[in-house]
Image (cartoon, rainbow, N blue to C red):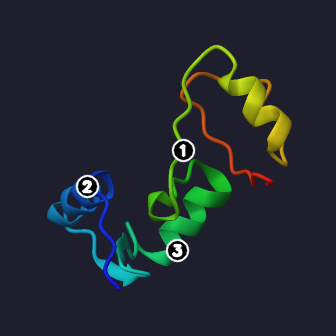
Amino acid sequence: MFVTDEKNTLLIEYLESMGFPSYQVDGYRVINRFSSAEEELDSLYNGVALRNISHHGIIELKGNDALDLVHRIATNSVKDLPKEGVKKNYLHN
C-alpha cells in the first residue's frame, strides 16, 4: 500500500533536503531524527520539543462553533486553546 499526502510529502522533502533522514511508516515517509538522541531528550526535558505526526492525520475546522464542537467530542479540554494551537486528543464516535 502506498499512501501520499501532498502537504506531508512537501514537508518531508524539505526536511530531507536539510539533511534529516526519513523512513517509511504505513506508506508515509517520516523523519527519523533531527539530531542525536541525547540532544533530543535534553530538548524534551529542558526546552522545547517538536514532534511531526502529520502522517497520522490533521483535521482543520473552521467557523465560529468549531472550538465548541471539538471541546464537546474530544477527550481533553480545548476551551483555552489559542488560535493555531495544537493539543493531542481523541475524538469519539
Could you tell me which secondary element the residue under label 3 belongs to?
helix
For marks 3 and 2, give the CA distance. Answer: 32 Å
Judged from this view, the residue extending furthest toward the top is: 64
Report crowding for label 3: few under 14, some 14 to 19, many 20 or more residues within 10 A (C-alpha).
few
Looking at marks 3 and 2 on the same chain, the residue that comes earlier in the sequence is marked by 2
Judged from this view, the residue extending furthest toward the front is: 93
**Amino acid at the residue labelled 1:** Ile
Q: What label does residue 37 carry, if any? A: none
**Amino acid at the residue labelled 3:** Glu
Judged left or right of residue 54, residue 74 is right
For marks 3 and 1, give the CA distance. Answer: 32 Å
Q: Residue at x 15, y 62 (%)?
A: 17
Q: Which quarter of the picture shows residue 36?
A: bottom left
**Amino acid at the residue labelled 2:** Glu
How far across and how far down the image is residue 63, in percent? Answer: 58, 18
Q: Label 2 near label 1: C-beta < 8 Å?
A: no
How far across and how far down the image is residue 27, in percent? Answer: 36, 79
Judged left or right of residue 9, residue 64 is right
Query: Which residue was labeled with disc 1?
Result: 59
Q: Which quarter of the picture shows residue 19?
A: bottom left
In the displayed structure, would residue 28 be above or below residue 12? Answer: below
Q: Label 2 near label 3: C-beta < 8 Å?
A: no
Of the 4 image quadrants, the one containing the C terminus is: bottom right
Could you tell me which secondary element the residue under label 2 belongs to?
helix
For marks 1 and 2, give the CA distance. Answer: 15 Å
How far across and how far down the image is residue 43, in percent? Answer: 56, 57
Report crowding for label 1: few under 14, some 14 to 19, many 20 or more residues within 10 A (C-alpha).
few
Query: Which residue was labeled with disc 3?
Result: 38
Could you tell me which secondary element the residue under label 1 belongs to?
loop
Query: Which residue was labeled with disc 2?
Result: 6
Q: Residue at x 20, y 62 (%)?
A: 13
